Image: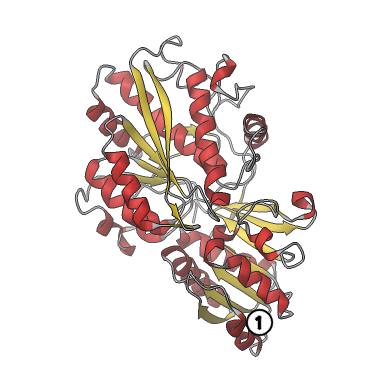
Amino acid sequence: MDRKKLGALAFGAMLVAAACSAGSGSPAPTAGGGESPAATDGGSASKGTLKIGVSLPLSGGPAADGQPTLKGAILAVEEINAAGGIGGYMLEVVQLDHAVNGKYNEQQGAADMQNFVSQPDVIGIVGPYNSAVAKVQIPIGNSAGLLQCSPANTNMSLTLPEFGALDYRKANPDKITYIRVAANDTIQGPAMADYAYNTLGLKNLLVVDDVTTFGKGVADTFQAAFEGYGGTVNRQAAGADTVDFNDLITAAKSKNPDGVYYGGVVTSGGGLFLKQLRQQGLAIPFTGPDGINNGTGKNAGSLFQIAGPEASKNTFSTVAAIGDFPAKKDFDLRFTERFKDDADFKTPGAYSGPGYACTTIIADSLKGFLESSPDADQAAIREGVRAWATDSSHSFETVLGTEVFDKNGDTTQPYISFYSEDPAGGEGTGAWKFEEQRNYGGQ
């Protein structure tokens, strides 16, 4: 697999100082830089409001994932509106929460998508966060022709025909309605396998998955790559409702693992698994995908908060997105200023930038379509946004850099970022520290 360390990412004009809320009254640049694409009519928004739906788990444990991502989308829309809207329209974020009883819920995710498609003025969706939810939402969006941009989904089957993507767009098999800025798990799993074997020096791993669409899929690709490097794997499964991992850990200790890979999310028990590993004396590296990277120890429901500061040491994760982009410092400052008075989630999460980027892509697609069809009705606008965003000849200047989507809806710049636990971060509760990132776009 070809690995290219990220140097300076070239794209467009760089960001300048921006308004951090709609009430600031000053024009705001988009993520890509230069003049906002929203400023197309001299600041007049006479045609009413169009909506961007946000579909994320926003309450309970998953809030540590969903809330920072939502806030990225909110910030983007506020900055667009501060610059005057797009083609005579202002934008509005409509957020729906598909967390139920402290976990993401596929059935609620489907109901939320039905809600969005029934609203003619919803022109695009940001989300979801979890691949299992995407599996039930994509067919609904595909049937209605409604664009969906996920900042975080990684399962292969959502986009790649060889993994079953056509099963999710039976209504319109030749029409792409789902795109994502996150790298898929054909990349994320092997990337951590490479990092675990060649950087951390691990050779004999306990690999546990949470038996979900995402967790099993990423663990499968991780295991295949890790064994390909010459490593050995003791593979186990622990369903998403597991709260006691002790028997599994006790049995695994006899095989003397020198590390652990957990394919899953924190709400499936990732934090409890880590805590119980340490309680049984296994201080070996604990690794996993982006499903375990959900904030500092100060955030309720985060891996570090559940496991505790001592147990969280020696922990590593991937994130299926670029972690150190040229506009990051400015974006982080704007985000923190905008949400500084909120009770929780005041700083960007791993997918706040991607959430902002997806919103930018929807807005830029609206701008592109309206330039040729300024008097289109809502049905035509919805289809125009979808067609513009999924056209691989179009590129988008976003906070993450230039985004282009391939024929399947995948980003053509799939970055994987690597993080380790910083015990001093989060005011001593633990936080994720960026280590490096690799661009797998040339593989």
**376 up-or-down from 105: above or below:** above
Left or right, residue 334 beside residue 62: right
Whole-percent x and y of residue 324? 64, 44
The residue carrying pointer 1 sits among few (fewer than 14), some (14 to 19) or many (20 or more) residues within 10 Å by Cα, namely many
**86 up-or-down from 250: above or below:** above
Residue 213, image quadrant: bottom left
**128 up-or-down from 20: above or below:** below
What is the secondary structure assignment of the residue under circle 1?
loop
Q: Residue furthest front?
A: 101
Q: Residue furthest bottom?
A: 254
The residue labelled by disc 1 is: 257
**371 up-or-down from 107: above or below:** above
The residue closer to the viewer here, 311 or 314, is 311
Residue at 67%, 32% (x, y): give it. Answer: 333
Residue at 63%, 65% (x, y): give it. Answer: 195
Here the colouring is: secondary structure
Left or right, residue 93 beside residue 323: left
Residue at 62%, 40% (x, y): give it. Answer: 325
Q: Residue furthest left?
A: 171
Whole-percent x and y of residue 178? 34, 46
The residue closer to the viewer here, 181 or 310, is 310
Q: Total label count? A: 1
Q: Is residue 64 visible?
A: yes
Q: Is residue 158 visible?
A: no
Residue at 69%, 72% (x, y): give it. Answer: 201
Which amino acid type is shown beneath numbered disc 1? Pro
Whole-percent x and y of residue 244? 58, 77
Whole-percent x and y of residue 168? 27, 56
